[in-house]
Amino acid sequence: MGRYKTGLETRERIVDATRRLLAEQGLEGTTIQAICEVADVRPGSFYNLFASKDAAILTVVKESARASDIRTPDGEPEVGAMIDGYVNFVSHHPQEARVYLRIAVSGALSDKDTQKWLQEFHDKRTERLVKAIAKSRPDLGPGEVTAKAKLLLASLNGLALHFILDDRFDIRLHADQLKKIVAMV
């Protein structure tokens, strides 16, 4: 049990160090050596837990992306909360959002495991948006709800990209406008 606990603690230190380095140094400054120094672990310990720097970075991005998927107290999705969660992820973790979008654009093209994770994550987020929109708009048919969910997610991805390219872009303002559009249409 002691070795297991130590392994979990080491893994958490590595993930925290990776998260911190991404925020402070960006993707290029997040090296295995830097991660090991900040986490106070040896490279062998790092490689016992992660196959590569990319694996550690992807772990951080996955955790942040999952954490942004806000649920209401009853556990059901709500459109506004989901939009806010996405915006919070992008605005509070811009480096991780950059990596997420970069992986979505390039990493998924070359790595089947990453592609699978991204597709599953995207599909689950779309399903939750479908449920949220159907709940708030019972007058819409299933096809309309699905189309709205896909367009909403595409719009959020576009807003995120704009924010990452121009940090003066007010993503929250535009997300609030998006909420209004979703409610109207």
Image (spheres, grey):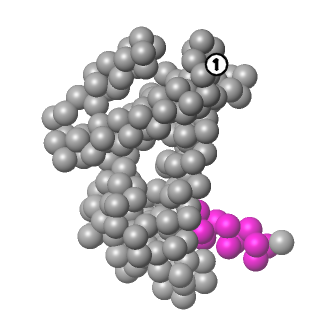
Q: Is residue 160 above or below residue 133?
A: below
What residue lies at 68% left-to-right and 73% top-to-bottom? 7
Extreme residue toward the bottom, this view:
44
What residue lies at 61% left-to-right and 28% top-to-bottom? 142
28 falls in the magenta region: no
Pick the front one: 169 or 31: 169
Residue 88 seen from this side:
no
Pick the front one: 104 or 12: 104
Pick the front one: 127 or 96: 127
Task: Report x, y in % for residue 44.
Answer: 54, 88
Q: Residues within 10 Å of mark 1 (few under 14, many from 20)?
A: some
Question: Which secondary structure class fits the magenta region best?
Answer: helix
Q: Residue 172 vs residue 68: left or right?
A: left
Task: Report x, y in % for residue 56.
Answer: 49, 69
Quarter assignment of residue 163: top left
Task: Report x, y in % for residue 157.
Answer: 36, 42
Q: What quarter of the picture does the N terminus occupy?
A: bottom right
Extreme residue toward the right, this view:
1
What residue lies at 26% left-to-right and 70% top-to-bottom? 28
Query: What segment is highlighted magenta in the picture?
Result: 2-14
- Residue linked to disc 1: 135
Quarter assignment of residue 153: top left
Residue 46 seen from this side:
yes
Q: What quarter of the picture does the C terminus occupy?
A: top left
Q: Is residue 30 above or below residue 176?
A: below
Q: Secondary structure at mark 1?
A: helix
Could you tell me the amino acid type at mark 1?
A: Lys
Report how many numbered discs are placed on residues in the image: 1
Task: Report x, y in % for residue 19.
Answer: 43, 58
Quarter assignment of residue 180: top left
Q: Residue 17 vs residue 67: left or right?
A: left
Q: Is residue 27 above or below residue 150?
A: below
